[in-house]
Image (cartoon, rainbow, N blue to C red):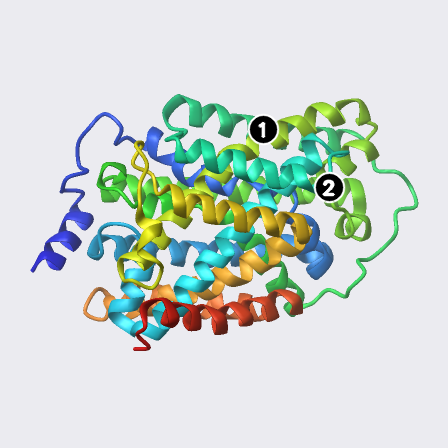
Amino acid sequence: MGQQVAEQQAATGAGPAAGGPRRSLGSALPLALGGMLGAGLFVGIAPATLAAGRLVPLAIPLVLVAVACCALASAHQSASYRGPGAGYACIRARLGVLPARFGAATALAGQVAALAAVAEVIVQHAMPAAPPAIAAAIVLFVVLAATAGLRIRGAAAWVWLLLALVVVGLVVAVCFAIEPPAGLPVGPPRGDGAIGITGAAGVLFFGFLGFERLTAPAHEQDRYRGKVVKWAVIAALVVTGAAVLLLSAALLHQLGPARLALSGQPVLDAMDAAAGGGLRPLVGTAVGLALFPVLLGILESLRSTALAVQRDQDLPAVLGRTSRAGTPYLLDLCAGVAAAVVALLVQPVAAMAFASCCLLVHHALANAAARVLLADDQVWRMRSACLGMGLAVILAMSMPVHAMLGTLVVVIAGPLLAGLVSRRWS
């Protein structure tokens, strides 16, 4: 009965989150966009071009459909499973313990890798001469700030988002205003094709993550009305999709597919190619600053899943201890140390690909659970979950080999570790 009431409240916009001064579209939109306008936007276009060449714009509608299905499934799961880790909770309730452990392991590993990748991108753009240890230090600094209770909301969130959009607008304007140098290499290092498009979409998936902060909040005070969530997610997907499309077109125009595919800092390389080298320090610093809230958003998502897993005793109970600010400080510290190690050992593009592959597997399982949850609901909702599951599997199988192998290790090791902690295997 409680589950039906929760679903009805989510559908009608009623319930505890229906009122309050923070429940407008203007305050909801930054929650989703705060994670999407991140490292995937500024760096992910290059590895996507390596996979698809000039066809990379065709990957954007594909990934938009996949993310929309995942966001819809997440919203329905949150309506039925309130509290942290709604997607994980739905997988456990609808598919069983073992699939839930697969989903939890891939979600947590993907979010740790995402923390490392974003920190490395910050350093590469804002402090290009700094050693990798600085990226590890940035992760730990942000984790400590979040543990102390730092959350970017309201007007501050809009300032950070506008900074990212201004950088995109500046780069696009410069790239199209200046003709590219003659004699650019023709063709990417790899051939174009359908597999390349799905591979590019898999990489770009990283740039659209963050919607779960809005669709499946861990705390009731962060919950918005159903209509606000719907329109905020739609607006976030439109803005992010337009930003990725415009930036990818500008970078392809200025660098060409071959040079773009091999670029580790495509935005800065494009500024150099367009005779905008004088703006390089300004753009690099702006990119670095714009990415700091993304780290906080990733940590919020990681906390949400980890606390749900700890509640089911698949993680040590000590990780649930909270500080005076109400944050799980031991959990934050473990996540920060793990991400710092990844930042020291793995390049950002590789970490990004691994994170995307892991999170695609997680969302494939989450959509499968949503399909069972929605079996008696409207047909189109159930079919959107099926579509999301299928697309997530296809995109994950199109990722680079190293990302798939790393994800396979997580899928095997995660349930084993959970079984050892809980001393339960089913």
Callout 2: helix, strand or loop?
A: loop
Q: Position of residue 306 (x, y in %)?
A: 37, 54
Camera-near label (1 vs 2) is 1
Q: Which mark is residue 289?
A: 1
Q: In this picture, is 248 found above or below 386?
A: above
- Which amino acid, by three-letter code, is at mark 2? Gln
> Residue extending furthest front?
318
Residue at the spot of label 2: 265
Q: Residue at x 24, y 68 (%)?
A: 93
- Which amino acid, by three-letter code, is at mark 1? Leu
On the picture, is 41 further left or further right than 263?
A: left
On the picture, is 185 further left or further right than 154?
A: right
> Residue extending furthest left?
1
Q: Residue at x 53, y 45 (%)?
A: 241
Q: Residue at x 33, y 77 (%)?
A: 425
Instruction: State whether residue 275 appears in this view.
Output: yes
